[in-house]
Amino acid sequence: VDALLRNGDLQLRLLDLQAEDTAIAQLEHRRRSLPEHAAIAGAKTVRAQLGQDLIGARTRVADLQVDVDKAESDLVPVRERRVRDQQRVDDGTVTDPKQLNALLDEIAHLGRRIGELEDVELEVMEQLEAATGRQDMLTGELTELENSMRALIASRDEQLREIFTTYERKDIF
């Protein structure tokens, strides 16, 4: 009879152990299959792509800023020359009719050149404005995504804490 009791106790202990193993396996499965894991992985992929896009946008803005600065620096000497030539005409320092005609032709040419350079500058400035808008949009999207990721990570961490607390308290039965 003693052997039968021990055998029954052993069977009960094995059943308890099996129940505990099952509960642990369920908690482990719950831990691995949290939906936040997939959402965080997806968000990381999107964040990497947004990061690459943002690098491209920042590069584009920097390149266009260089182009705007160049366009402006190209305009400065042409404008200065036109002002100097106009002053010579206005001062009356050029008295020779041929030289005066040549100077007036040059002033007209410089005016056309200034118009062309200003058109180029305007076009580049418009491109810069569009590129800056895209950069700002991507920066906003990245910030929003990172905030979302922080919330997902916090949610995942809270659920993991609950799972580990359940396991530690042996509330798994």
Image (cartoon, rainbow, N blue to C red):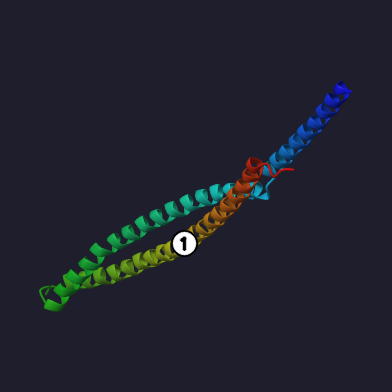
| Above or below for 153 versus 3 | below
Asked whether residue 133 appears in the rendered view, the answer is: yes
- Kindly identify the residue that appears in the image at 20 percent across and 70 percent down: 103
- Kindly identify the residue that appears in the image at 50 percent across and 58 percent down: 143
Could you say which is closer to the camera, residue 18 or residue 102?
18
Could you say which is closer to the camera, residue 21 or residue 41?
21
The quadrant of the picture occupied by the N terminus is top right
Q: SS of the residue at dot 1? A: helix
Could you say which is closer to the camera, residue 141 or residue 131?
141
| Above or below for 151 versus 121 | above
Residue 70: percent from left, percent from top? 32, 57
| Above or below for 67 versus 107 | above
Residue 81: percent from left, percent from top? 21, 66
In this rendering, position of residue 172 left or right of residue 137 = right
In this rendering, position of residue 63 left or right of residue 54 = left
Work out which residue is located at the far top of the displayed protein and give it: 3
- Kindly identify the residue that appears in the image at 69 percent across and 45 percent down: 171
Instruction: Give the residue type that dot 1 points to.
Output: Asp
Asked whether residue 41 appears in the rendered view, the answer is: no
Residue 39: percent from left, percent from top? 64, 50
Could you say which is closer to the camera, residue 18 or residue 144?
18
Q: Which residue is mark 1?
A: 136
Q: Quadrant of residue 26?
A: top right
